[in-house]
Image: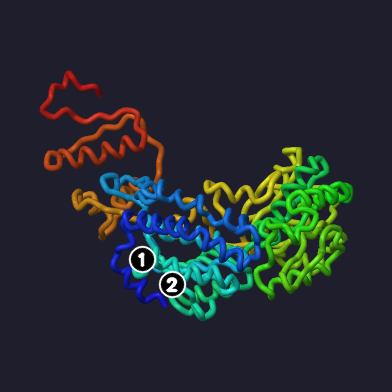
Amino acid sequence: MGSGLRAAWLTGKTRPVEFRVAQLEALGRFLDEKKQDLLDALASDMHEVRGCVEAWVGTGVPLLGLPLFGLDTWMKDEHVEKNLVTQLDSAFIRKDPYGVVLVIPPWHCPILPALVPLIGAIAAGNCVILKPSEATENIRTLMAEVLPSYLDQVEAPHACPCPEGTIKLLENKFDYIFFTGSPAMGRTVMTAAAKHLTPVTLELGGKNPCYVSDDCEVHIVARRVAWGRFFHAGQTCVAPDYVLCSAEMQEKLLPALREAITEFYGPDPKVSPDFARIVEDKQFHRIQALLSSGRAAIGGQVDQQERYIAPTVLVDVEPSDPIMQDIILGPILPIITVRSVDEAIDFINARERPLVVYVFSSDKKVVKEVLERTSSGGFCGNDTLMHMTLTSLPFGGIGESGLGRYHGQFTFETFSHQRGCLQRTTALEPINALRYPPYNPHKTGLLDSAFIRKDPYGVVLIIAPWNYPIHLLLVPLIGAIAAGESKLCSPCVGARQDLCVG
């Protein structure tokens, strides 16, 4: 698998910025010219009547142009601080591509987690094998059959239909693996990567809590929570997975949520052109089984033939119920009552760290307290999902919710090896002689002075010998200036002594 890409990578043709930009522009043409085909494929896979508006919004198309404008800057060598003995040398960090990388997007969101890593991998100069999910058959076919005609099939990212399973694919050696999916499959990916010591990014989702304090504007909270939970029929890893609030807030929140759902999807969400269906039968049955937890205060209707599950809010949910044991990835929102923000924080901290923590409160102190006392991949106060729109923010999990980060420049950095480089001068060998054996106290003392940071002395005198008048004057002068000496003096050989400023 990928032998042609490996050969292409070894030629070095993917490294020049011109090649990378050309491939990104070609990917842009693919998204522009095949937009309707992508929408039709999404509609077939997701059963959204109005062309999968929500899925298309999340394709990452707005992110595509970003590397085209920032790539030159991102690729530049990053020059770093030097010590005394390397002042005349060049020390820098080179952003090298890894080589042949594997990108595996999930079943529930087939475009965004495929395109955004793909864009970053191309921008970083890698060759890519893209492994679309078998669950979204139409998207997989389109990616496999059409995308290679836009991108260089030998030297550039390559969409692979991969009839073999993901586990079989992982037996091959890759230089980097980017996986989005479940924690269970993430462990499988990491185990396979360990065989070849391959670095990985794992985006695994998690049970994202949403604490709602008593001092909120309930109708605003209801609209933002309902949008975040039922966007794409809840099949997003960043959806609020459950609400924590007081019993009093629950009584206010339920009618407000019912009103928001009706506003978004009408009195019968099943006939709404904007409400998606579950991607595949296996996932439909899994999500349907979760409805046995608690009691459906809103929704609860299902249609197996259409893989439809209504926007549902559950109450009387216990922490031990099945719906609280794993990420939902469906249009179900459980509510668990707590007595205070402290109890909510304890509830969150007693579980695995989520991909994102949400909190709603009119009191900034409450928002700050939840932020400071919890740990998660990301955080969003007084809204849901919107932190995803900022490419200036890294996106990724922690612990059970993932490993690594991406979005915007962070994606480029993820697919770039930070290569530490030092280019030395061959001059000044007498100074370099200090590091060669045999060693003595005088040499070790001088080496300590060169490598250990010390305070400046103040006024220093520099005396250069006749046989190296320039090098052995400039090197100590550079070091003294770097050390912060307040005044420097060198003997005025062959010059007028009365003009000396020392």
* Residue in front for this viewpoint, 204 or 88: 204
Q: Position of residue 195 (x, y in %)?
A: 48, 77
Q: Position of residue 445 (x, y in %)?
A: 33, 49
Instruction: Give me the residue at 82% from left, 47% from top.
Output: 256
Q: Is residue 83 left or right of residue 28?
A: left
Could you tell me the amino acid type at mark 1? Answer: Asp
Could you tell me the amino acid type at mark 2? Answer: Phe
> Could you say which quadrant of the image residue 20 lies in?
bottom left
Dot in front, 2 or 1: 1
* Image disc number at residue 152: 1
Q: Is residue 355 above or below residue 461?
A: below
Residue marked by disc 2: 174
| Residue 420 shows in the view | no
Q: Is residue 2 left or right of residue 477?
A: right
Quarter in which the C terminus is drawn: top left
Instruction: Give me the residue at 84% from left, 53% from top.
Output: 338
Quarter in which the N terminus is drawn: bottom left
* Image disc number at residue 268: none
> Could you say which quadrant of the image residue 286 lies in?
bottom right
Q: Is residue 74 left or right of residue 85?
A: right
Instruction: Give me the residue at 68% from left, 61% from top.
Output: 276
Q: Position of residue 349 (x, y in %)?
A: 73, 57
Label 1 SS: loop
Q: Are marks 2 and 1 in contact (CB under 8 Å)?
A: no
Mark 2 Cα-neighbour bin, 10 Å: few <14, some 14–19, many ≥20: many
Label 2 SS: loop
